[in-house]
Image (cartoon, grey):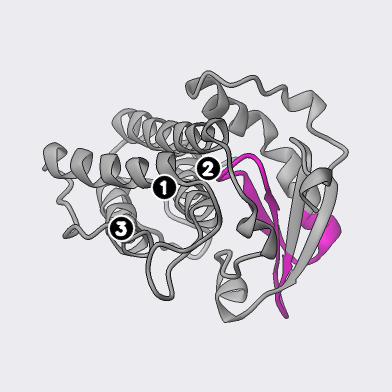
Amino acid sequence: MAARLGPKSVYLETGSRRVFACSVEWPGWCRSAKNEEAALERLAEYAERYQVVAAEAELPFDAAEQTPFDVVDRVAGNATTDFGAPGVVPQLDAMPMTEVDAQRQAALVAAAWTVLDRVAAGAPAELRKGPRGGGRDRDTMVQHVLGAEASYARTLGVKHREPALDDPAAIKALREDILDVLRAARDGTPRTEKGWPPRYAARRIAWHVLDHAWEIEDRSEPAAG
Protein backbone atom coordinates (compact mmCIF):
# COMPACT_ATOMS: atom_id res chain seq x y z
CA MET A 1 0.00 0.00 0.00
CA ALA A 2 2.77 2.45 0.85
CA ALA A 3 3.96 2.59 -2.75
CA ARG A 4 0.56 3.85 -3.88
CA LEU A 5 0.37 6.74 -1.48
CA GLY A 6 0.80 10.31 -2.63
CA PRO A 7 -0.58 13.82 -2.09
CA LYS A 8 -3.94 12.87 -3.64
CA SER A 9 -4.40 9.71 -1.54
CA VAL A 10 -7.51 9.54 0.61
CA TYR A 11 -9.28 6.86 2.56
CA LEU A 12 -13.00 6.54 3.25
CA GLU A 13 -14.47 5.75 6.65
CA THR A 14 -18.05 4.56 6.23
CA GLY A 15 -20.60 4.45 9.02
CA SER A 16 -24.28 3.66 8.78
CA ARG A 17 -25.29 7.31 8.30
CA ARG A 18 -22.10 9.22 7.50
CA VAL A 19 -18.93 8.82 5.40
CA PHE A 20 -15.66 10.62 6.04
CA ALA A 21 -13.15 11.26 3.26
CA CYS A 22 -9.73 11.86 4.79
CA SER A 23 -6.49 12.85 3.15
CA VAL A 24 -3.65 10.51 4.05
CA GLU A 25 -0.79 12.96 3.58
CA TRP A 26 -2.47 16.23 4.63
CA PRO A 27 -3.47 15.99 8.32
CA GLY A 28 -6.73 17.73 9.07
CA TRP A 29 -8.08 17.77 5.52
CA CYS A 30 -11.05 15.54 6.19
CA ARG A 31 -14.75 16.12 5.50
CA SER A 32 -17.93 14.10 5.74
CA ALA A 33 -21.28 13.64 4.01
CA LYS A 34 -24.03 11.05 3.65
CA ASN A 35 -22.25 8.90 1.05
CA GLU A 36 -18.84 8.36 -0.56
CA GLU A 37 -19.40 10.56 -3.60
CA ALA A 38 -20.70 13.45 -1.54
CA ALA A 39 -17.88 13.12 1.00
CA LEU A 40 -15.25 13.31 -1.76
CA GLU A 41 -17.02 16.32 -3.26
CA ARG A 42 -17.06 17.98 0.14
CA LEU A 43 -13.36 17.28 0.60
CA ALA A 44 -12.61 18.89 -2.75
CA GLU A 45 -14.67 21.95 -1.79
CA TYR A 46 -12.38 22.51 1.19
CA ALA A 47 -9.12 22.33 -0.79
CA GLU A 48 -8.76 26.12 -0.96
CA ARG A 49 -9.36 26.44 2.77
CA TYR A 50 -6.76 23.78 3.47
CA GLN A 51 -4.31 25.58 1.19
CA VAL A 52 -4.11 28.28 3.88
CA VAL A 53 -2.91 25.64 6.37
CA ALA A 54 -0.30 24.27 3.99
CA ALA A 55 0.96 27.79 3.28
CA GLU A 56 1.30 28.41 7.01
CA ALA A 57 3.44 25.26 7.20
CA GLU A 58 5.43 26.51 4.18
CA LEU A 59 4.49 23.44 2.16
CA PRO A 60 3.45 23.52 -1.52
CA PHE A 61 -0.23 22.79 -2.01
CA ASP A 62 -2.15 23.73 -5.14
CA ALA A 63 -5.87 23.36 -4.43
CA ALA A 64 -6.63 23.13 -8.15
CA GLU A 65 -4.33 20.12 -8.59
CA GLN A 66 -5.49 17.96 -5.68
CA THR A 67 -8.25 16.20 -7.58
CA PRO A 68 -9.15 13.65 -8.80
CA PHE A 69 -8.51 11.86 -5.52
CA ASP A 70 -6.95 8.42 -5.30
CA VAL A 71 -8.99 6.31 -2.87
CA VAL A 72 -6.41 3.94 -1.37
CA ASP A 73 -8.42 2.36 1.45
CA ARG A 74 -11.88 1.94 2.94
CA VAL A 75 -12.58 1.28 6.60
CA ALA A 76 -15.78 0.46 8.43
CA GLY A 77 -16.91 3.29 10.64
CA ASN A 78 -18.52 3.15 14.06
CA ALA A 79 -20.75 5.20 16.36
CA THR A 80 -18.14 7.97 16.46
CA THR A 81 -18.25 8.19 12.67
CA ASP A 82 -22.01 8.61 12.70
CA PHE A 83 -21.81 11.10 15.57
CA GLY A 84 -19.66 13.33 13.37
CA ALA A 85 -15.97 12.60 13.95
CA PRO A 86 -13.50 10.25 12.26
CA GLY A 87 -13.17 7.40 14.72
CA VAL A 88 -11.34 4.45 13.14
CA VAL A 89 -7.57 4.02 12.69
CA PRO A 90 -6.80 2.78 9.17
CA GLN A 91 -4.11 0.14 8.68
CA LEU A 92 -2.07 2.52 6.56
CA ASP A 93 -1.22 4.48 9.71
CA ALA A 94 1.11 1.64 10.69
CA MET A 95 3.46 2.65 7.87
CA PRO A 96 7.03 3.66 8.77
CA MET A 97 7.95 7.34 8.61
CA THR A 98 11.13 9.14 7.76
CA GLU A 99 12.33 12.14 9.72
CA VAL A 100 11.06 14.32 6.86
CA ASP A 101 7.61 12.71 7.09
CA ALA A 102 7.46 13.29 10.83
CA GLN A 103 8.61 16.90 10.63
CA ARG A 104 6.09 17.57 7.87
CA GLN A 105 3.15 16.17 9.79
CA ALA A 106 4.13 18.11 12.92
CA ALA A 107 4.41 21.31 10.86
CA LEU A 108 0.89 20.85 9.53
CA VAL A 109 -0.55 20.27 13.00
CA ALA A 110 1.23 23.40 14.23
CA ALA A 111 -0.13 25.30 11.23
CA ALA A 112 -3.67 24.18 12.07
CA TRP A 113 -3.26 25.65 15.56
CA THR A 114 -1.96 28.91 14.08
CA VAL A 115 -4.96 29.12 11.77
CA LEU A 116 -7.37 28.49 14.64
CA ASP A 117 -5.70 31.11 16.83
CA ARG A 118 -5.79 33.68 14.02
CA VAL A 119 -9.41 32.97 13.15
CA ALA A 120 -10.50 33.16 16.79
CA ALA A 121 -8.62 36.43 17.31
CA GLY A 122 -10.51 38.01 14.43
CA ALA A 123 -13.94 36.60 15.25
CA PRO A 124 -16.71 38.20 17.31
CA ALA A 125 -17.24 36.76 20.79
CA GLU A 126 -20.83 35.89 19.94
CA LEU A 127 -21.17 33.80 16.80
CA ARG A 128 -24.17 33.52 14.52
CA LYS A 129 -26.42 30.70 15.70
CA GLY A 130 -26.78 27.51 13.75
CA PRO A 131 -29.87 26.52 11.75
CA ARG A 132 -31.60 25.28 14.92
CA GLY A 133 -30.56 28.27 16.99
CA GLY A 134 -27.67 26.53 18.72
CA GLY A 135 -23.89 26.31 18.63
CA ARG A 136 -21.05 27.36 20.88
CA ASP A 137 -19.79 30.92 20.91
CA ARG A 138 -16.13 31.69 20.15
CA ASP A 139 -14.46 31.32 23.55
CA THR A 140 -16.51 28.27 24.52
CA MET A 141 -15.57 26.61 21.24
CA VAL A 142 -11.85 27.31 21.59
CA GLN A 143 -11.92 26.02 25.17
CA HIS A 144 -13.63 22.88 23.87
CA VAL A 145 -10.79 22.40 21.38
CA LEU A 146 -8.22 22.79 24.16
CA GLY A 147 -10.00 20.20 26.26
CA ALA A 148 -10.06 17.77 23.37
CA GLU A 149 -6.35 18.34 22.74
CA ALA A 150 -5.50 17.48 26.34
CA SER A 151 -7.50 14.27 25.92
CA TYR A 152 -6.01 13.43 22.52
CA ALA A 153 -2.51 14.09 23.88
CA ARG A 154 -2.89 11.18 26.29
CA THR A 155 -3.12 8.81 23.33
CA LEU A 156 0.47 9.90 22.58
CA GLY A 157 1.64 9.54 26.17
CA VAL A 158 1.50 13.32 26.79
CA LYS A 159 -0.25 14.19 30.05
CA HIS A 160 -1.36 17.75 30.73
CA ARG A 161 -4.36 19.21 32.45
CA GLU A 162 -6.75 20.99 30.15
CA PRO A 163 -5.24 24.47 29.74
CA ALA A 164 -7.42 27.50 30.33
CA LEU A 165 -8.12 29.79 27.43
CA ASP A 166 -6.37 32.66 29.23
CA ASP A 167 -3.23 30.62 30.03
CA PRO A 168 -1.02 30.87 26.93
CA ALA A 169 1.95 29.29 28.71
CA ALA A 170 -0.04 26.14 29.48
CA ILE A 171 -1.42 26.01 25.94
CA LYS A 172 2.07 26.34 24.49
CA ALA A 173 3.46 23.63 26.79
CA LEU A 174 0.73 21.17 25.79
CA ARG A 175 1.16 21.84 22.10
CA GLU A 176 4.95 21.67 22.18
CA ASP A 177 4.88 18.30 23.93
CA ILE A 178 2.46 16.95 21.31
CA LEU A 179 4.70 18.24 18.52
CA ASP A 180 7.79 16.69 20.12
CA VAL A 181 6.15 13.25 19.97
CA LEU A 182 5.00 13.76 16.37
CA ARG A 183 8.45 14.91 15.26
CA ALA A 184 10.09 11.87 16.84
CA ALA A 185 7.72 9.33 15.28
CA ARG A 186 9.22 6.79 12.90
CA ASP A 187 6.52 4.12 12.71
CA GLY A 188 2.89 3.45 13.49
CA THR A 189 3.41 2.02 16.95
CA PRO A 190 1.11 3.67 19.53
CA ARG A 191 3.07 5.26 22.37
CA THR A 192 0.64 4.02 25.03
CA GLU A 193 -1.62 1.02 25.53
CA LYS A 194 -4.79 1.66 23.51
CA GLY A 195 -3.17 4.83 22.19
CA TRP A 196 -3.17 6.19 18.65
CA PRO A 197 -0.46 5.80 16.02
CA PRO A 198 1.26 9.18 15.52
CA ARG A 199 -0.06 9.53 11.96
CA TYR A 200 -3.62 9.08 13.14
CA ALA A 201 -3.14 11.37 16.13
CA ALA A 202 -1.86 14.13 13.86
CA ARG A 203 -4.80 13.69 11.50
CA ARG A 204 -7.41 13.60 14.26
CA ILE A 205 -5.96 16.56 16.17
CA ALA A 206 -5.66 18.69 13.05
CA TRP A 207 -9.13 17.69 11.86
CA HIS A 208 -10.73 18.78 15.13
CA VAL A 209 -8.82 22.06 15.21
CA LEU A 210 -9.68 22.94 11.61
CA ASP A 211 -13.27 21.76 11.84
CA HIS A 212 -13.85 24.35 14.55
CA ALA A 213 -11.67 27.03 12.96
CA TRP A 214 -13.75 26.78 9.80
CA GLU A 215 -16.96 26.74 11.83
CA ILE A 216 -15.91 29.95 13.58
CA GLU A 217 -15.16 31.51 10.18
CA ASP A 218 -18.54 30.48 8.79
CA ARG A 219 -20.51 31.57 11.83
CA SER A 220 -18.72 34.91 12.02
CA GLU A 221 -20.42 35.90 8.78
CA PRO A 222 -23.99 37.27 8.59
CA ALA A 223 -26.63 34.74 7.62
CA ALA A 224 -27.33 34.64 3.88
CA GLY A 225 -30.46 36.45 2.78
* Residue 88 image offset from top left, x and y in percent: 60, 70
Can you identify the residue that label 2 sits on?
A: 223
CA separation, marks 3 and 1? 18 Å
Relative to 77, is 183 above or below? above
Choose the circle earlier in sequence order: 3 or 2.
3
Question: At 62% from the left edge and 44% from the top edge, which residue is drawn?
Answer: 29
The secondary structure type at the circle numbered 2 is loop
What is the magenta range? 13-39
The secondary structure type at the circle numbered 1 is loop
Three-letter amino acid code at the position of disc 3? His
Crowding at dot 2, Cα within 10 Å, few <14 / some 14-19 / many 20+, comes out as few
The quadrant of the image that shows the N terminus is bottom right
Q: Is residue 108 visible?
A: yes
Choose the circle earlier in sequence order: 2 or 1.
1
The secondary structure type at the circle numbered 3 is helix
CA separation, marks 3 and 2? 24 Å
Proximity of marks 3 and 1: CB atoms separated by less than 8 Å: no
Three-letter amino acid code at the position of disc 2? Ala
The quadrant of the image that shows the C terminus is top right
Relative to 7, is 138 above or below? below
Can you identify the residue that label 3 sits on?
A: 144
Choose the circle earlier in sequence order: 3 or 1.
1
| Residue 128 badge | 1
Crowding at dot 1, Cα within 10 Å, few <14 / some 14-19 / many 20+, comes out as many
Q: Is residue 225 visible?
A: no
* Residue 168 image offset from top left, x and y in percent: 15, 37
Three-letter amino acid code at the position of disc 1? Arg
Relative to 56, is 222 above or below? below
> Given this view, does label 3 or label 1 mark the residue nearer the observer?
3
Proximity of marks 2 and 1: CB atoms separated by less than 8 Å: yes
Instruction: Identify which residue, 72 or 217, lies in the foreground.
Output: 72
